[in-house]
Image (spheres, helix red, strand yellow):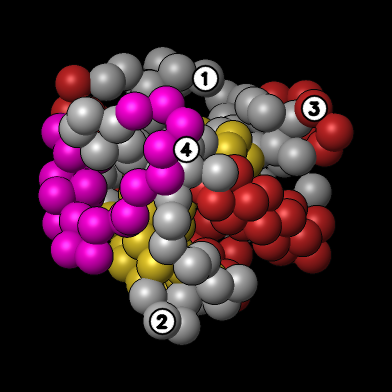
Amino acid sequence: MTKQEFSFRLKNASFIALDFAERYVSDKLKPNFRYNVIFTFPNHDNNVKFDIYPEDEGIIKLNLTNIEVIDLLYRKNKVPIWIDINVLKSSRNTTTFNLLCAGRYSDDDDELYYNEDHAGPFGIKSPTFPIGYKEGEKFKLEKTNIFRELYSKIKQLCFKKSF
């Protein structure tokens, strides 16, 4: 995959995730995007077909532009084999997404998850539902949930095996 193709897929996934989130949230989501990148812990199974960057394990990068995301994640013509994207928050000017990234990188489209219709490696996920969420009712994204959300993701990563 070229850097340009990865950029296109990030932008496309962002708009799809924004449209998906609008089904659930009452906030006005803006098409000016920022990203939080959360690196998972890769399996160290000596699988030579994937590149692994141990120095990234557990690292979180906040409030990145799309160009910063591409520069961070596109390495040696390879990308993470999966990236879960979901709307985290909205402000007057921007919509912020979480990008939860696999720790294994590949340049083979057949190795990418979510690659139906050449959308890989991006998997569209819902915004985090509030406690007591009722199907069909829209909710407001919490304005101060970034630290709670990141804490929750970190906690999940500590007890989750990478696949």
For the point 18% across and 21% down, which residue is it? 159
Q: Is residue 135 magenta?
A: yes
Q: Position of residue 43 (x, y in %)?
A: 38, 22
Q: Could you tell me if residue 51 is visible in this image?
A: no
- The disc at residue 92 is 2
3D distance between C-alphas at marks 4 and 2? 21 Å
For the magenta stretch, what is the residue range?
Answer: 134-155
Q: Which residue is mark 3?
A: 116
Q: Is residue 101 magenta?
A: no
Q: Amino acid at mark 1?
A: Asn
Query: In the rendered structure, are the residues bearing label 4 and label 3 in contact, judged by CB atoms less than 8 Å apart?
Result: no
Location of residue 101 (image quadrant): top left
Of mark 3 and mark 1, the one earlier in the sequence is: 1
Query: In the rendered structure, are the residues bearing label 3 and label 1 in contact, judged by CB atoms less than 8 Å apart?
Result: no
Location of residue 116 (image quadrant): top right
Of mark 1 and mark 4, the one earlier in the sequence is: 1
Q: Position of residue 69 (x, y in %)?
A: 52, 65
Is label 3 or label 1 in front?
Answer: 3
Q: Secondary structure at mark 3?
A: helix
Q: Residue furthest right?
A: 117
Residue 143 or residue 134, whichever sits in front: 134
Question: In the figure, is residue 4 to the left or right of 132?
Answer: right
- The disc at residue 96 is none
For the point 42% across and 62% down, which residue is it? 27
Residue neighbourhood size for the residue with mark 2, other residues' Cα within 10 Å, grouped as few (<14), some (14–19), many (≥20): few
3D distance between C-alphas at marks 3 and 1? 24 Å
For the point 29% across and 31% down, which residue is it? 133
